[in-house]
Amino acid sequence: MRTVCLIALIAVSQVAGQRQSAPLKPPFGPANQLVSPDGAYALFGGDAALCQLWLEDRRTHERKTVFRVTLQTLTLAWSPDSAAFIANDRAVSDLEYAYIYDVKTLVRLDLRSRILAADAEAARFVPGHNTAPHSYFHAIRWLDARHVEVQLHGHTDGTQVGTSVRPGDCFDLRYRVARDGTVEKLSRRLAALTAKGCPWME
């Protein structure tokens, strides 16, 4: 049985310091690339059967597989100096992972792991022994060539307490993460989950 991978790729770039999104439209492949600011490299998605993110050196035309895409949505952004890029992989509907890749080595920095190691509070907002929240780690944008802004957001589910249900929690935490893995917490916002969802999304 052939496995079909449905890919939605959204490219994120910076124009005059602002974040700008543009979709990589089908057909996926080298014809629809996200080119680095210096023009030396390009990222593109494989076709529906391959389900891979590729990096091409536009000078040598050498291509490398970045990682196998197992996702609903992948968002990408090049660093201003073209030395790295971020990739946000929403593997399933209730989880998203964020990475920084070094363009020369394709060594990746797992932003989820770095944040969990640096901020003990974040652990309650990721799937674990007693929790199963909708949890999204999303690298929003490059703040400069060395730092990205990362958002941990989502909500926990309600819990049964006797004959009543305690509502879940909405959470939105922001971090500044350096390419060397240093994490700085920027903000924290918590609220009760309502019938309409999270208050800041109503």
Image (cartoon, helix red, strand yellow):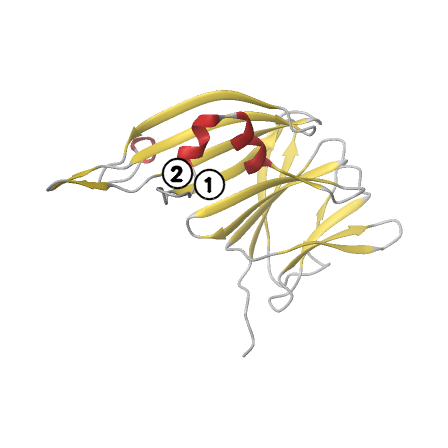
In the image, residue 89 above or below residue 191: below
Residue 25, horizontal then vertical, whole percent? 59, 57
Q: Residue at x 64, y 33 (%)?
A: 14
Residue 49, horizontal then vertical, whole percent? 62, 69
Total labels drawn: 2
Q: Specify whether residue 150 is in view.
A: no
The quadrant of the image that shows the N terminus is bottom right
In the image, residue 183 above or below residue 197: above
Assess disc 1: are there few (<14), some (14-19) or many (≥20) residues with their C-alpha within 10 Å of its C-alpha.
Answer: many
| Residue sticking out furthest to the left | 163
Left or right: where 76 falls relative to 185:
right
- The residues tagged by marks 1 and 2 sit, at their Cα atoms, a distance apart of 6 Å
Q: What's the amino acid at mark 1?
A: Tyr
Left or right: where 95 falls relative to 182:
left
Q: Are marks 1 and 2 in contact (CB under 8 Å)?
A: yes
- Mark 1 and mark 2 lie on one chain; the one further toward the N terminus is 1
Q: What's the amino acid at mark 2?
A: Gly
| Residue sticking out furthest to the right | 60
Q: Secondary structure at mark 2?
A: strand
Left or right: where 202 falls relative to 26:
left
Provide the residue designation for mark 1.
Answer: 136
Provide the residue designation for mark 2.
Answer: 154
Left or right: where 36 falls relative to 60:
left
Q: Specify whether residue 139 is in view.
A: yes
Residue 52, horizontal then vertical, whole percent? 65, 59
Residue 147, horizontal then vertical, whole percent? 65, 26
The quadrant of the image that shows the C terminus is top left
Given residues 83 and 180, the one toward you in this image is 180
Assess disc 2: are there few (<14), some (14-19) or many (≥20) residues with their C-alpha within 10 Å of its C-alpha.
Answer: many
Dot label at residue 178? none
Q: Residue at x 46, y 41 (%)?
A: 136
Q: Secondary structure at mark 1?
A: strand
